[in-house]
Image (spheres, grey):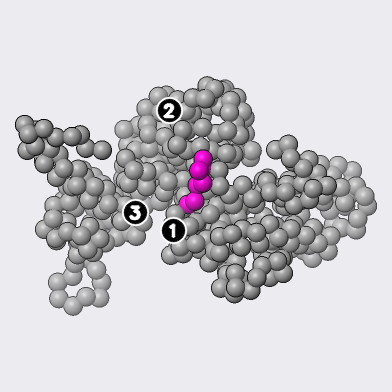
Amino acid sequence: MLPLLTPDDTTDAKWSVVAYKKNQKVKKALLHLYQEGPSTLAKLAEVLHTSIPSATNIVDQLVEEGWVDTIGTVSGNNGRRPVLFRLNPVGHYVLVVDSNTHGTRLSVVNLLREIIFECSDDRTLEDTPGFSALLVSLVNDALLEAGIAKSDIIGVGLSLPGLIDSRHGLNLSYPNLGLPGQSLTNWLERHWKLPTFMINDTKATALGEHRFGSGRGKQHALAINIDWGVGLGIIINGEVFQGASGFAGELGHIQVNPNGELCYCGKIGCLDTLTSASSLVRRVQQGVVAGKTTKLAMYSSDPGQITINHVVEAADQGDAFAIDQLHETGYQLGKGLAIAVTLFNPEIIIVDGVLAEASLFITNSIRQAINKHCLSGFRDDLTIEVTKLNGAAKWLGTHAYVIENLFVNS
């Protein structure tokens, strides 16, 4: 908010307003180039609602500062062909950190959304202050190994599972990552000396799908992330819906069976207990112990070896038991999604996560359940698709979250 003016500082304030508006146009130009790709001066002037000379001045400034470069001219035009400008892939990198129950992956990503360095660590997310210290050292080591100066990093995006309050930098599902009640992102910023943004992993997936995947151009979309838990990313009016505290979308913790299993959250009969990858694997293991006829019986001496990949592989080979288990998982998930469809009336549901590999077995049964449990008006124009981003939606969304915060909200 601009300060109140006194007669003596009116002139200075006018210049401040001019500088502020110019800065906003610079950020808007950067955001357009990030989201839409290469652009001409005429198009940038249209987006910025300014004249071509003013757009030229902005682009010249960005070229001089290393944010933008030229990549030739528009093809196919008669006469003088306009020059195309794009974001410069060198420098201004974002460090994407994805930590979960599988491990931790770090990626250095340029402004063209290209990974220029990547490394991983087998240590999984733990609810301890020591894990935060580990993240600090992993980032510092990664930059050293990549030979990238910290001055070339414009921000860090941290993708984590759990109930994340982005406003206060807290993860309420992992409260011991930082000091009690204190912002984890602020603590990490002090150690990294870099702007740090934290986002729930499913919301990151939804953002990536909306900006660069099957949800692109859709105003209302759902992205279901089927991992060791079940998360729902909600796009409303083209933006990720956060809810009052940032917790919207915990579909896995709606009760679907009052007499069901105890969920790890402490409640009874959550959707997670029926549809998460971990619950699916547990049921398959129990079936193998019970002597079900299946290719997976080869693990009967040690059913704990069975993984979700084994189940999907068996289904692909026509194993009836594995197919039935995947079908039941998809159908129960579809019943839960039918509630979300009725509430949010989306144009598309995008399936992502470890069970996306079982695309046909999952999407067909999801569609059957939605057809049965939703009114026709909600499903007539609804598309259900498996992600086309091949596991990239989460890091793309985390990258976009950092860039959009830097270019819009800062």
Query: Which quadrant of the rendered structure holds the N terminus?
Result: top left
- Callout 2 environment at 10 Å: few (<14), some (14 to 19), or many (20+)? some
Distance Cα–Cα, label 2 vs label 3 = 26 Å
Where residue 240 sits: x, y (%)? 47, 52
Q: Amino acid at mark 2?
A: Asn
Mark 2 or mark 3, which has the lower sequence index? Answer: 3
Mark 1 residue type: Gly
* Residue 34: mark in rendering: 3
Secondary element under disc 2, as helix, strand or loop, is: helix
The amino acid marked with disc number 3 is Tyr
Q: How many marks?
A: 3
Name the side, left or right, on which 280 lies relative to 93. right
Q: Is residue 122 above or below residue 307?
A: above
Residue 186, numbered circle: 2
Name the element at disc 3.
helix
Q: Give the left or right position of residue 398, taking residue 42 as reference.
A: right
**Vertically, is 11 above or below 207?**
above
Q: Which residues are magenta?
A: 240-246
Q: Position of residue 149 (x, y in %)?
A: 34, 32
Asked whether the beta carbons under mark 1 and mark 2 sit within 8 Å of each other, the answer is no
> Can the viewer see residue 5?
yes
Q: Residue at x 31, y 33 (%)?
A: 151
Q: Can you identify the residue that label 1 sits on?
A: 238
Give the alpha-carbon distance from disc 1 to disc 2, as whole Å: 28 Å
**Residue closest to the eye, 262 or 112:** 262
Tell me the mark number nearer the camera, choosing from 1 and 2. Answer: 1
When the figure is inspected, residue 243 is found, relative to residue 328, above or below; the finding is: above
